[in-house]
Image: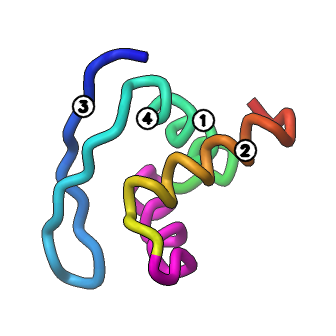
Amino acid sequence: MGSLKKRSINLAGHATSLALEPEFWAVLQQAASADRISVAALIQRIDAGRNERPLASACRVFALHHAQAGTI
């Protein structure tokens, strides 16, 4: 996988940065497009359901499940 790409995301009114490999960003973009929402809105959904898992890990797990489901 490539080097990490960092993006700024606004979660619950707070700016945060999220660093993921480009491959994960691509899957998140595809998932967001399929749901007709922004990547930021998708990450907000992931954030809401992640419990104690770090946000970057939750995004990677989401992307993995999305890929395993054959939706990409």
Check residue 49 for magenta coloring: yes
Quadrant containing the N terminus in the rendered view: top left
> Up-down: is 13 above or below 22?
below
Residue furthest left in the image: 15
Measure the C-alpha gap from mark 4 to mark 2: 12 Å
Q: Which residue is mark 3?
A: 5
- Label of residue 66 in the image: 2
Instruction: Give neighbour class at mark 1: few <14, some 14-19, many 20+ (Cα, 10 Å).
Output: some
> Up-down: is 69 above or below 14?
above
Q: Amino acid at mark 1?
A: Gln
Q: Amino acid at mark 4?
A: Trp
Q: Amino acid at mark 2?
A: His
Q: Which residue is mark 4?
A: 25
Sequence-wise, the earlier of marks 1 and 2 is 1
> Up-down: is 42 above or below 64?
below
Measure the C-alpha gap from mark 1 to mark 4: 9 Å
Q: Tags 3 and 4 in contact by the CB under 8 Å rule?
A: yes
Instruction: Give neighbour class at mark 4: few <14, some 14-19, many 20+ (Cα, 10 Å).
Output: many
17 to the left or right of 30:
left
x and y, in percent, of residue 14 in the image: 16, 78
Q: For the magenta stretch, what is the residue range? A: 38-52
Sequence-wise, the earlier of marks 1 and 4 is 4
Q: Amino acid at mark 3?
A: Lys
Sequence-wise, the earlier of marks 3 and 1 is 3
Sequence-wise, the earlier of marks 3 and 4 is 3
Q: Which residue is mark 1?
A: 30
Measure the C-alpha gap from mark 3 to mark 2: 20 Å
